[in-house]
Image (cartoon, rainbow, N blue to C red):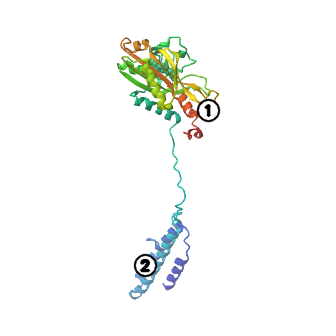
Amino acid sequence: MHEALEALRQEITQTPIDSEAAAEAFRIRFLGQRSGQLTHLFKRLRELPPEERPLLGGQLNALKRLAEQRLEEARLRLRPTPTGSAEIPDLTLPGRRMFTGSLHPLTQTLEAIVRVFEQLGFAVVEGPEIEDDWHNFSALNFPPDHPARDMQDTFFLHQGASYAEAVVLRTHTSPVQIRVMERMQPPIRIIAPGRVYRNEAVSYKSFCLFHQVEGLYVDQNVSMGDLKQTLHLFAQALFGKDVRMRFRPSYFPFTEPSAEVDIWWPLPDHPEGGRWMEILGCGMVHPNVFRAVGIDPERYTGYAFGMGVERIAMLRYGIDDIRLFYENDVRFLEQF
Ligand code: 2NL
């Protein structure tokens, strides 16, 4: 027994424990409840004469403690040490800047436009991007042979036997306003922001989709003067108090009279110090549009306007190619 204990002591001290797996093998080999060598010897104690038991029992317990200590030491040694936890951080280093995204320049511009009209009392309305001929064209006084009704200019989802059966991707957000006028009587004061589609040759100045904000104000005694003052307040809010503005006569099927609005855009390098830039189209709502939606054109008048969000964003930020808005190149986007 004595030699057996001494041999075991040697084994316990000399068995290398250099991994988690080795530690577990060590535990099973010496301390395992079923076949551990120490457990085995403890069982054999009972076979000895009673007077020898205390001495050998004490020695066995000492060996058991030795095995347990080696195991504990190995586990502490093998435990993965949390890296750097003991190092004192350099508190004088500048902080790392958190990466934050930003809103797309078109979203920022659209929201800036919408905010101005909300402050002027306009309600924001949205509607479907797939429209029927009535809401996109006919109710807006487009003649049956208007070029916008051509495959060349509009994306058709369904053509039908006659133009009136067409289903299209909306070419402007006017149909949203038609839908509002069909449902309610004046006073109506709304803006309709959203995405629109036109089948154009893609280039730096036109894309197959873009964004619009249209506005509509219908009540008794709404005048062209109201329109000019409202649009002037809008231009001041977006381009500054000193903005210069001019109205040029124009034509749209759905307004009469119609105008296009320019603002003076100062350019230091330009021989004339700047140039007039078109920012929107507008006019007094055509009586045929009122008739189409069931509003009495003898009783009510109204103005309407429409602007391209891309156009205004390009002016605002000095962007020279409309396609940049849709490429989602981070090197472009992170500048806003
Ligand atoms: C432009 C010009 C315009 C309108 C849009 C409109 C809507 C209804 C009735 C009458 Cl429901 N008019 N909208 C009027 C004039 C101009 O847009 O250059 N858009 C990008």
Question: Within the image, what quadrant is residue 61 found in?
Answer: bottom left
Q: Nearer the viewer, residue 53 or 109?
A: 109
Q: What is the x, y in percent for residue 185? A: 35, 18
Secondary structure beneath dot 2 equals helix
Query: Which numbered disc flags the more N-terminal residue, 2 or 1?
Result: 2
Q: What is the x, y in percent for residue 330? A: 58, 40
Asked whether residue 171 appears in the rendered view, the answer is no
Q: What is the x, y in percent for residue 98? A: 51, 49
Residue at horizontal 45%, vertical 81%?
62
Asked whether residue 288 appears in the rendered view, the answer is yes
Residue 24's tag is: none
* CB of mark 2 near ligand 1 (< 8 Å): no
Please give the residue where the numbered disc 1 appears in the rendered image. 268
* On screen, residue 125 above or below 14: above
**10 Å neighbourhood of mark 1: few (<14), some, or many (≥20)?**
few
Q: Amino acid at mark 2?
A: Phe
Question: How much space separates mark 2 and mark 1, taking CA atoms?
Answer: 99 Å
* On screen, residue 81 above or below 3: above
Residue at horizontal 50%, vertical 68%?
24
Q: What is the x, y in percent for residue 314? A: 56, 31
Please give the residue where the numbered disc 2 appears in the rendered image. 42
* CB of mark 1 near ligand 1 (< 8 Å): no
Q: Amino acid at mark 1?
A: Pro
Q: Nearer the viewer, residue 59 or 184?
A: 184
Q: Is residue 291 left or right of residue 268?
A: left
Q: Nearer the viewer, residue 302 or 236?
A: 236
Question: Within the image, what quadrant is residue 298 found in?
Answer: top left
Nearer the observer: mark 2 or 1; the answer is 1
Residue at horizontal 46%, vertical 28%?
234
Q: Is residue 33 left or right of residue 92?
A: left
